[in-house]
Amino acid sequence: MSEYISLEPEYTLDPDLVILHTNLDLAPDGAERYASRAAGEEGSPLAQFLFQIEGLAALELDGGRLTVRREPDAEWHALIDEITAALKEFFL
């Protein structure tokens, strides 16, 4: 595992949806989709870990791509910073 984690945001036309590209394999067993926090609480260990972050409404893990839907009052810069920190803690 690399000690360097990259995370590049790709903003979409939907203001509540961002695709984060990383050098990590986030879903080695295949794509995972969690349409709600409740679904994430029953998901993979990574999904459960990420859903501890306030403001995260839904997510999809697929290879090196993390698609994130935020709660309406969440700020992207803060949410992306927290996701980056969580990935570092989880993988390193």
Image (cartoon, grey):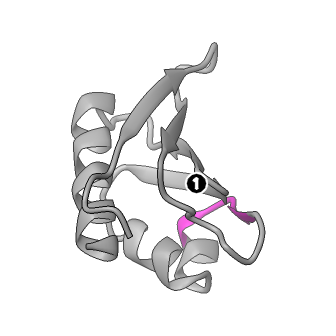
- Quickly name the residue at label 1: 58
Q: Quadrant of residue 61?
A: bottom right
**Would you say 14 lies left or right of 47 here?**
right
Instruction: List x then y, in percent, for residue 28.
Output: 67, 73
The answer to whether residue 15 is magenta is no
Q: Nearer the viewer, residue 2 or 66?
A: 2
Q: Residue at x 25, y 73 (%)?
A: 92
Q: Nearer the viewer, residue 77 or 61?
A: 61
Count all numbered tags in the image, as a single digit: 1
| 46 shown above or below 13 | below
Q: Amino acid at mark 1?
A: Ala
Instruction: List x then y, in percent, for residue 24.
Output: 49, 58
Q: Residue at x 22, y 57 (%)?
A: 85
Farthest residue, direction right: 30
Instruction: List x then y, in percent, for residue 7.
Output: 38, 40
Q: Nearer the viewer, residue 17 or 84?
A: 84
- Label 1: which secondary element: strand
Instruction: Tell me if mark 1 has few (under 14), some (14-19) or many (20+) residues whose alpha carbon lies within 10 angstroms of its own.
Output: many
Farthest residue, direction top: 13
Q: Residue at x 53, y 44 (%)?
A: 68
The answer to whether residue 35 is magenta is yes
* Span highlighted in magenta in the image: 32-37
| 84 shown above or below 48 | above
Q: Residue at x 66, y 56 (%)?
A: 63
